Amino acid sequence: MLIHEFQAKDFLRRLGWGVPEGSLAETVEEVKRLAGELGCPVILKAQVLAGGRGKAGGILKALRPEEAAHLANRLLGSKLVTAQTGSQGLTINKLLVEKAVSPKKELYCALAVDRRNENLVAIVSQQGGLDIEELSRFRPQLIKKIYFEPDEGLKNFQARQLAYFLELTESLVKDFVARLKLLAGFFIEKDLKLLEINPLALTEDNRLVALDARIEFDDCSLARHPEIASLRDESQENELEKRARKFGLNYIKMDGSIGCLVNGAGLAMATMDIIKHFGGQPANFLDIGGGVTEEAVSQAFELLLADTQVVSGLINIFGGIVRCDLVARGVVTAASRLSLNRPVVVRLEGTNVNEGRRILEESGLPFIFASDFEQAARLAVELSGQPR
Amino acid sequence: MLIHEFQAKDFLRRLGWGVPEGSLAETVEEVKRLAGELGCPVILKAQVLAGGRGKAGGILKALRPEEAAHLANRLLGSKLVTAQTGSQGLTINKLLVEKAVSPKKELYCALAVDRRNENLVAIVSQQGGLDIEELSRFRPQLIKKIYFEPDEGLKNFQARQLAYFLELTESLVKDFVARLKLLAGFFIEKDLKLLEINPLALTEDNRLVALDARIEFDDCSLARHPEIASLRDESQENELEKRARKFGLNYIKMDGSIGCLVNGAGLAMATMDIIKHFGGQPANFLDIGGGVTEEAVSQAFELLLADTQVVSGLINIFGGIVRCDLVARGVVTAASRLSLNRPVVVRLEGTNVNEGRRILEESGLPFIFASDFEQAARLAVELSGQPR
Amino acid sequence: MSILIDAKSRVLVQGLTGKEATFHSQRMLEYGTRLVAGVTPGKGGQLHLGLPVFNTVEEAVRAESPEVSIIFVPPLAGAEAIMEAAAAGIKLIVCITEGIPVLDMLRVKSWLKKCRASLIGPNTPGLISPGQSKVGIMPGHIHQPGPVGIISRSGTLTYEAVNQLTAAGLGQSTAVGIGGDPVVGLRFVELLEMFRTDQQTRAVVLIGEIGGQAEEEAADYLKASGYPKPVLAYVAGRTAPPGKRLGHAGAIIEGRQGSAEGKIERLREAGVKIIDNPGRIGVTTAEILSSLH
Amino acid sequence: MSILIDAKSRVLVQGLTGKEATFHSQRMLEYGTRLVAGVTPGKGGQLHLGLPVFNTVEEAVRAESPEVSIIFVPPLAGAEAIMEAAAAGIKLIVCITEGIPVLDMLRVKSWLKKCRASLIGPNTPGLISPGQSKVGIMPGHIHQPGPVGIISRSGTLTYEAVNQLTAAGLGQSTAVGIGGDPVVGLRFVELLEMFRTDQQTRAVVLIGEIGGQAEEEAADYLKASGYPKPVLAYVAGRTAPPGKRLGHAGAIIEGRQGSAEGKIERLREAGVKIIDNPGRIGVTTAEILSSLH
């Protein structure tokens, strides 16, 4: 679970890190007032839960309070589309208004789970900012990584290695070591997946200031951190995706014409792959998961049909934990409620397949049955009007 | 550093463990009042920093408040000599007055550092009480040990293994697991060497109550736990030993006639061994340590001579970190202050030996020089009037 | 032969008395899996599905000597269940549980190293040596004994692959789901090595997925080892949405690896037969195997 | 030959710029020890005693390739100093520091296992291969090269033993202080094994102490290995006061081991020549060695 920049900076502040002077605003008037109080230039930062805000115009500088108000007026309530939001974008409900900081140097500092080494990793770079990924490819010598285990924590000497790598002055070394250790403790205690400070500004007066911060928690651990779970901002979720999550469904909207309902993420991806293979375009990724209920299946099918771009549907179920009859009942319920007006290809296999097929057949609804995966995909693509 | 039973029980109570109802008293009147308030029978427990109090008469039961007062009058201010106090015993300044608990069963529970396995160990036994050591020799199947690492902590499943081994009822299993984990966390956080609850009573109404508790902290870690260091009860230390500790000296009073001043614990033990080997009796163990100052040496020599049982002295120094000249200066200062009236054999070797010897010789004091370890010991024994 | 489990494997079920575990344990017993005991704290001494239930894995091991354990417990108890099994001396642990926090899994991996135990999963359908033993939740009837080894990061997609193979007349030696989580126990490489020396196995099918580096590692291993058996692979997710990015750190840590195209390219270079159409896993494998003669 | 260190060993000093470290580093340089660098955080770039100082062990290793590190830091920084050396790839670490908390040392031991590094100490005078290299704080001049290996839990008592040997005309191959703390790095057994195959060493003198089980382990090892060289032992503390007891737990954990008599008995049974009079360590060793001819 990603949290907003202002929430991440709150955590950083509490852990002793310097952040720019600033405050959150939800109206143009507040932005103008804050710009006046803080003293211009100020930076307005759109609080949407996605990266790539800068390039998308979500981070703007204002030289006067009037300009701040003008920009805020443009940003607040609008949708910001970044490389990570998808084409619908995310609504800007809040702006973080910060006094501008002009750094002498921009560093990079992050803590993350490294699944490859099955360890935690602390990463610093002498050159932060937007080009950090390019840097990691072409000038890896400017980046230093230190691995550590969750039970052992980050050691003083490891933090020191990073501090000296950043060529900080001796007084900052001690500060940085102490704070990075607090950060690592926080990371471990709260089950983070990522904590990134980029850029970490080194100011003219030799202070470290976190100009931007990204914190991502492990969704699987939220049950043991209710105080973290409560930070979720539902306004930043796509309506369909939010509805899906409520029923334990994994749904991601895409731009094609074939709506898919599948059990299992791997089979769902394979279903999309095969649709493309035959020249079709999937309208979504939808995994109903293993512990699904009849009601959730019903919701899933409604979700699929709620997408007006969908021309044909494809239900692909390989029963294991999930029983085909349960899926069939859920689908029939939803189809009856909605008056099914688009062709839906059904392929059932595995646990209770015969019972499932019987339920669908007896529903009298116009399902088209396929005998195997490949045939199902072919049919769905044909019916979507985009055959190869 | 050992703490008192009442201090240990305070920690246990804060960690959710049941302890008998009771309170601390320093006067006979308080004891009587408490006995009345708690309701008899009560147990009076001498708060001295040593084990073996029960067998030594430091733990007594009173059936009426008057009896409690009577017993308190006998105990308070007296010296309790147990198998672990040495012959001088320890002064009883405080009594813990507790309402008597009659257990259905006496269990044993401890956490400790196991230096052999270089790990922490949790130990439980279905049969606690005084015979636990015998039990460990003759019925080891009644004892269960679980090893765990400080960074990993005690796991739930490990605590469960211990709980089921104790054959607790299911509701107590959950309690015990939760509390034992808290105990292990405390052990690790505060750098304990030992935490022992013995006996751990299982009462008729199926509660666990810690009847006695022993907590020992690692002296080396006290610098990072000032709140623990402040629990030290100096009134429980031998005056000479306390004075020694203040100067960083390791002094233990014994019953012989030859006072020893040595650098290094191993050489100090070897010095005592060789004295016995030649038929003498050491009056003390005294290791001046490595980082000793001239003033500390001086204090050490005064300490040695302050023991009126001392007939002869033996200074055995193998200079390494410690310089012989520094030792010589310290000794001369003390000897001059005290008017040295007993023969002292000196054996110096190692760093700055010549300078040391010169200082002693020029002092005009009656030191007797030995050329090697064996000769020094022989001379000291002869001068103590106990030749072989 | 087969790898990891066979008809003689003695299997413990952790969390046996739970609803899901009960359902799947019944299916395993029906399949012929030699379940010998269950563990549910607080239910020690009971019988469940005819199996003795113990409070701790330690007691179950002492009484029934299981060699394999399959875990059905809630996500936040998953890591401890794995550790308990390893500490009690179980050498193969299969964790069905989904949703174990990733930091817990890092701790588990250190623990397993100390205990020298192997883990399959978590978030796996388990594994099956058809006709011998099923330690998992996959539908047993779609499998049949035969020459194809399967290693998969997916659940239902594995069933799909198995179903296609069986339909094409090809049975399986062992089919292993390694689990879909970021941190899992045994990965492609270790299992490929086991299949390498398994006499029953004549070809291996890998079912990969976008994300992580398991496929790249497999490619490197296959190239370096001069693998003696044909290996086929389908990598799911070529058309998947990009998904939420793990900040810049992801790119710094993982470089440019993790994409379906990258994985496919690396596997192809290592001599792996790439299956583009996931509807043709069975027939492609049959073609390859018949071309061996 | 010798064990662990010789004239070529490149040695790093952690905490070099401190007072004690400075004093003893000068003595080591005078003795001929090949000190190559020092580490003191915040003093990187300086020269001290003519040696380059680095901020981290990692930098020192990269620049000067030391193989051995000797540590002089305050007690509460001791454990981290050892870990830092091991993490940087140093394979032999000598920790002079006294008073490291025992839980810190438990953590250090796990860490060393992962890094495959060996530790001498803490709370040790260090080790010396006379005439070649001294990595410690012992007075160098009392040593001379020769056939006797020494392993000791004590500090000054080791000097006493060395002095007696030298006086008896016997030099030393290597003298190692393993440290007096409850948890230390290398113990008697590992070092006995090194002396076993060292050609220069013709006899080994053990200096033991009451407490712990190191002597008992040594006895078991000697008995089991059919040790080919004469071993002599003096165990200090037969007359020591009983000391404060570690509760009942001590007895439960350690059983009846740990007393001087117990240790002596076990060593004697293992064929070790017991020295009763610590004033006769040198002459007894000389007698044993001359009787070999």
Image (spheres, coloured by chain):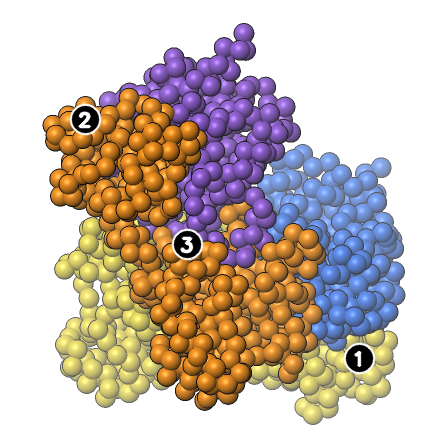
Chain colours: A orange, B yellow, C purple, D blue
Q: What residue appears at the point 48 percent right and 79 percent down from the top-left corner?
A: A98
SS for callout 2? helix
Work out how far the residue at label 1 is from the one at label 3, CA to CA, in angstroms: 84 Å
Work out how far the residue at label 2 is from the one at label 1, CA to CA, in angstroms: 100 Å
Q: Amino acid at mark 1?
A: Asp
For the residues bearing labels 3 and 2, Cβ distance under 8 angstroms: no
| Left or right position of B294 against A121 | right
What mark, if any, has residue A87 been given in the picture?
Answer: 3
Residue marked by disc 1: B325
Quadrant containing the N terminus of chain A in the rendered view: bottom left
Q: Amino acid at mark 3?
A: Ser
The one nearer the camera, B224 or B346, is B224
Q: Quadrant of residue A97?
A: bottom left
Q: Nearer the viewer, mark 3 or mark 2?
A: 3
Quadrant containing the C terminus of chain A in the rendered view: top left
Residue marked by disc 2: A357
